[in-house]
Image (cartoon, helix red, strand yellow):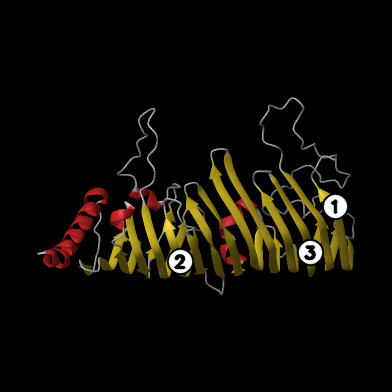
Amino acid sequence: MYAAVGFWLVPKLLRAKAESFVADNYQRTLTIGDVRFNPFTLQLEVDGFSLPDADGEPLASFESLVVNTQISSLWRRGASFEEISLTHPYLRPVIRKNGELNFADLVKPFPEEPPPEGEEEEEPPRLFVAQLRIGGGHAHFEDRRLETPYVADLKPLAIEVRDFSTVGSSDNAYGLHAEAGSGASLDWGGSFTLSPLASEGRFKFENLDITKHWAYLRDSAGFEVTGGTLRFDGEYDFAAMDSGTQFVAKLRELGIAGLGIRRIGEEADTAKLDAVTVSGVDFDLGKNAASIEKVLVEGGSVTAWRDAAGQLNLANLTKPAGEGAAEAEVAVQTPAPAAETAPPADAEPGASPAFSFSAPDIELKGVVVEVEDRQPEPPIRLKLDPFNLRITGFSNAPD
C-alpha cells in the first residue's frame, strides 16, 4: 500500500494540484511532463515544466528538477533536503511599458496582510538544503519602457549553494557563474545568512561589451557610448540590521579598453580612450564616503571645440545635438568656490552627513587633444600631442 501510494498516487496528486492551482489563480495552463516519486528514497523528479506569461510566452520553465528529501526533517523540525538540482531553467523577466514587472502577477492573487497590531512577525520557516545546483540556465530580460526596448540574455547560468539554512546555523556558501554573450562572464561567490540578512563575498566581471548594454543607461546618462569593453573585480560586505543598512565594497581594479564617447545625435566621437583604469575603489554606505586610489587614462584622443555662439562641446556632451543653441554663452572663467559639504551648525542631530569623495591621483598619459575655436574667422586650431595631465589630492571635503 505504501509503495502504491508513493509511486502512483503522489505524482498524480502533485500534477493535479499544480495544474488546478495555476488555472484557478492565474487563468493559465501549466505544462508538466513526467512526475516521479520514490517513497523509499524520498526522491522527487519532475520533467518538462513550463509556466506561461500573460502574453502566452514562457514565464518560467525547466527541463528537469530532482529533489532528494532527508529523513532528518523529522528531528530538525523543518524541511531538510540532501540535494535540489535544476537543469536548464529558463526565466523571462519583463518590465512592461507601464513599469510593471511580469513576475508581480504571481503575487497578485495573494495580497499581503499586515500582522495584527501588537503581534510579532513570524520567523521564516525552517529549511535546510545540503546542496542546491542550477545548471545550464538561461535568463532573458526585457525592459519595454524604453523607446528601443532593452534586451539582455544571461546564458549559460550556473549556481551552486552549499549548506543552506534559514535558521542561521550554517554559512550558506554560494557560487554563481553566468555568461552574457560576446565572451562576457560573471563570477560571484561568498556566503549569506537570512537572520539577520547579511552577505559577504567576491565578484568578477570580464569582457563586457558596453555598447550592447548602454541603451539601458543612455537616457539617464545623456550621452552615447560607441565602444568599450569593461572588466572589474572586488569584494563586498552587506548587513541589514535594526540600526540601519551596512554596505562596504572594494573594487580592486576597474578597466575599460577602447572607450568611445559622443554627444547623442552627432556622428563623430568626442573622446576615444585606449585604456581607462580605476584602482583601489572603496565605498562605505554607513560613512557615506567613497575613495579612489588611482585613475589612469592612457592613449587615445579628445576633440574639444567652441562654436560661433560660444558653446563648448564638452560642456554640452549630455545634451542631444541641436539643443542648447539659445542658451547663454558658456564662458571660460574661474569657478566659484564649491559650497561646503559639511552640515550646518544648526543641523538636526542624526542628519545624514554629506557624501565625501576623494581621488588623490588622477593622470592622463599620451592623449592627443585637438582644440578648435570657431568664433574667430578663420577658426583657430591647435593639436596637443602628447597631452599629459596629473591631478593630485582631489577631494570634495570643505577644507
Q: Quadrant of residue 231?
A: bottom right
- Kindly state the secondary structure of the residue where label 1 is placed: strand
Mark 2 sits on what residue? 159
- Residue farthest along the top direction in this orientation: 346
Tag 2–tag 3 contact (CB < 8 Å): no
- The residue shown at (65%, 66%) is 226
The C terminus lies in quadrant:
top right
Give how far apart the Cα atoms at labels 1 and 2 are: 43 Å
Q: Nearer the viewer, residue 164 or 274?
A: 164
The reply, left or right, for residue 75 in relation to residue 256 is: left
Mark 1 sits on what residue? 393
The three-letter amino acid code for the residue at tag 1 is: Gly
Checking the image for residue 296, the label placed there is 3
Q: Residues within 10 Å of mark 2 (few under 14, many from 20)?
A: some
- The residue shown at (30%, 44%) is 109
- Kindly state the secondary structure of the residue where label 3 is placed: strand
The reply, left or right, for residue 252 in relation to residue 40 is: right
Q: Is residue 105 above or below residue 91?
A: above
Instruction: Give whichever of discs 2 and 3 has the lower sequence position.
Output: 2
Checking the image for residue 157, the label placed there is none
